[in-house]
């Protein structure tokens, strides 16, 4: 289970050091093997432990390719999916094309999302959070959230 927010820097070679609090779990669950792909809705990256990605990949592959939206989603998520392995220092190299898509240059935010992480440009993340805090939900929640008590 990945939760929390971590900020760090992308080095000159395009590598990110996975925060220590996540490294041990990643070593245990996937031997440091990860898959990074683009997010279909936002300009960020999705980073999955390999075992979690294989489940997502299987679900995507089973969807009907005759559906135009499904085909587009497969092209994006599967087409950009890149297997990465943590080095002995806990770093992974993010491919240039993925860094470009998410606007990752120097300051990066890693957001735990349960079974995966999101990687954001710190500026983009801060702007998104500012917008979320200003948003008025008007007391109306989607049906899926009505039973959630927090």
Image: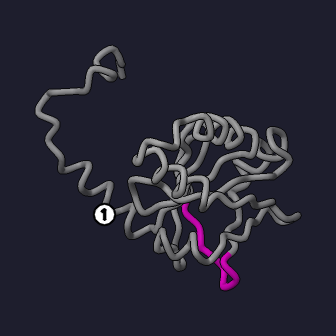
Q: Residue 17: name its quadrant.
A: bottom right
Q: Where residue 24 sits in the image (x, y, percent)? A: 80, 45
* Secondary structure category for the residue under label 1: helix
> Which span of residues is magenta-colored?
7-14
Q: Where residue 6 sits in the image (x, y, percent)? A: 56, 56
132 horizontally vs 73: left or right: left
Question: Residue reaching furthest front?
Answer: 66
Q: In the image, what residue occupies the spot 66% across and 78% down?
A: 14
Q: Main secondary structure of the magenta part?
A: loop
Q: Where residue 80 sits in the image (x, y, percent)? A: 60, 62
According to the picture, the residue beneath numbered tag 1 turns out to be 127
User: Is 96 rendered above or below residue 4?
Assistant: below
60 horizontally vs 149: left or right: right
Q: In the image, what residue occupies the spot 70% across and 59% down?
A: 18
Q: In front: 64, or 47? A: 64
65 horizontally vs 96: left or right: left
């Amino acid at each position: 289970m990945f939760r929390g927010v971590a900020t760090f820097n992308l080095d000159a070679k395009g590598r990110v050091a996975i925060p220590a609090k996540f490294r041990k779990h990643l070593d245990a669950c996937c031997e440091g093997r990860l898959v990074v792909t683009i997010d279909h809705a936002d300009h960020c990256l999705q980073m999955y432990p390999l075992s979690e990605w294989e489940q997502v990949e299987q679900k995507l592959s089973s969807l009907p390719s005759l559906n135009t939206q499904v085909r587009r989603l497969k092209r994006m998520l599967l087409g950009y999916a890149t297997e990465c392995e943590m080095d002995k220092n806990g770093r992974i190299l993010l491919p240039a094309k993925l860094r470009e898509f998410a606007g990752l240059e120097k300051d990066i935010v890693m957001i735990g999302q349960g079974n995966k992480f999101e990687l954001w440009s710190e500026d983009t993340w801060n702007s998104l959070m500012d917008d979320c805090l200003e948003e008025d939900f008007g007391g109306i929640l989607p049906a899926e959230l009505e039973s959630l008590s927090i």
